[in-house]
Amino acid sequence: MTTQYRFNRQEFAGSLGDLGTILPIAIGMILVNGLNPSGLFLSVGLFYILTGIYYGVTVSVQPMKVIGAYAIATAMSSGQVLAAGLLMGMVLLVLGLTGAIDIIGKYTPKSVTRGVQLSTGTLLMAQGVKLMIGTSKLQLFHKMTEPYLSVQSLGPIPIGIFIGIAGALLTLFLLDNKKMPAGLVVVILGLFIGLILGTKEGFDKISFGFYLPQWLPLGFPVKTDFTFALFALVLPQLPMTVGNAVIANADLSKEYFGEKSKKVTYRGLSITMALGCILSFFLGGMPLCHGAGGLAAHYRFGARTAGSNFMIGILFVLLVLSLGSGILAVIYLIPMAILGVLLIFAGSQLALTIQDIFHRKDLFVVVVILGITLATNLGFGVMAGFGLAYLLKSEKVKI
């Protein structure tokens, strides 16, 4: 077996490292926006497998977070979300096939890339804390700290805080343990807690069989869905996707895998994300991307080869084909706080990539992007960072 594909405990643990990003947004978009559970998780699984085969290294698969967060917060229709996914696919396909994305990447300063990575990492850590204390959008929607556990608190303290602290300490002690990989142990702990304290949501609907996916299960969006999605979802998402999922992700892949990641190019990432969005659209799922945060998560928890992509991809595909929409019952077993732990460690891994920024002007760009991102969103942070980085090239401007 070549080192391009390894199948062991470390790879499996690493493959689970990004569940903290995928599951909360996926569950939210199924419950709030009415996306198809089977199609959503099948598209995620297939995208993991196919991109692992093509790139030959660990590649992340994530929801497009601006679209996901805004769609959940405003309870958009499934048609509007699907329209956004198809439009994003078409835009990314044009950027990739024409080579326009290479030009954007060529003129993106390193300080902007590091600013995107720090901002994304910080957002992931903040979201992880929210999942632990019960204030994420999904938990607020349910008005419960742990929507799928029968116990919500121990005295006045939310139970998620206890689970989160226990999971975080366990992760710290096992982070570099090869016999008991942290990501695997923490997810197993979560499943165990879910089996003991869970509400068993959806267990009554589980029926093992062979479930084939439907094509366009939610129908085709109408014209007004596309118009709305373009301005409300696609335009705000695009700067974040280009900055984080293309430029920052390609940079991080080179840092982690060196020559092995030669296929992980700006053009390649744009085209595979485009195809992933289009696939997900036809299966009734969410818009998909390759986030730098997801790659950091997989790597932090042990993924070093494309074997991790096969493991998580096949897991999702088998669960969908054998359980259909009953896959949600299995996913509900993992407490939100456990997903939060995964996000905190993944975010810290990504944020620490700024260690190679030494010049004061570059560091200023990085922290300004972070500040604007926290105040508005990453799209605005990226655009402001571009302008500032080029302005600071002038000797007349001192920081």
Image (cartoon, rainbow, N blue to C red):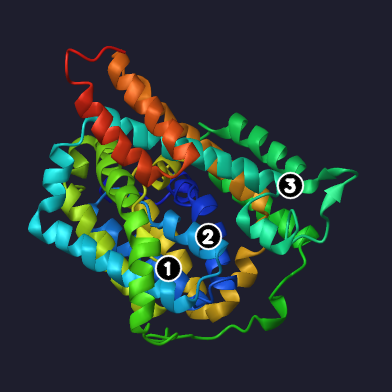
> In the rendered image of this protein, does residue 197 appear above or below residue 82?
above
Crowdedness near tag 3: few (<14), some (14–19) or many (≥20) residues, C-alpha within 10 Å: many
Mark in front: 2 vs 3:
2
Q: Quadrant of residue 326?
A: bottom right
Q: How many marks?
A: 3
N-terminal of the two: label 2 or label 3?
2
Give the secondary structure at mark 3. helix
Q: Residue 76, percent across and down?
A: 51, 71
Instruction: Tell me, for residue 286, which label it has, or none.
Output: 1
Determine the residue positioned at 26% across, 48% down: 246
Residue corresponding to mark 3: 160
The foreground one among 338 and 285 is: 285
N-terminal of the two: label 1 or label 2?
2
Q: Are marks 2 and 3 in contact (CB under 8 Å)?
A: no
The foreground one among 69 and 306 is: 69
Residue corresponding to mark 2: 25
The foreground one among 64 and 22 is: 64
Q: Residue furthest left?
A: 98
Q: Is residue 24 visible?
A: yes
Q: How far apart in space, not on screen, are marks 1 and 3 (Cα)?
A: 27 Å
Crowdedness near tag 1: few (<14), some (14–19) or many (≥20) residues, C-alpha within 10 Å: many
Give the secondary structure at mark 2. helix
Determine the residue positioned at 23% across, 68% down: 90
Q: Are marks 1 and 2 in contact (CB under 8 Å)?
A: yes
Q: Is residue 143 left or right of residue 272?
A: right
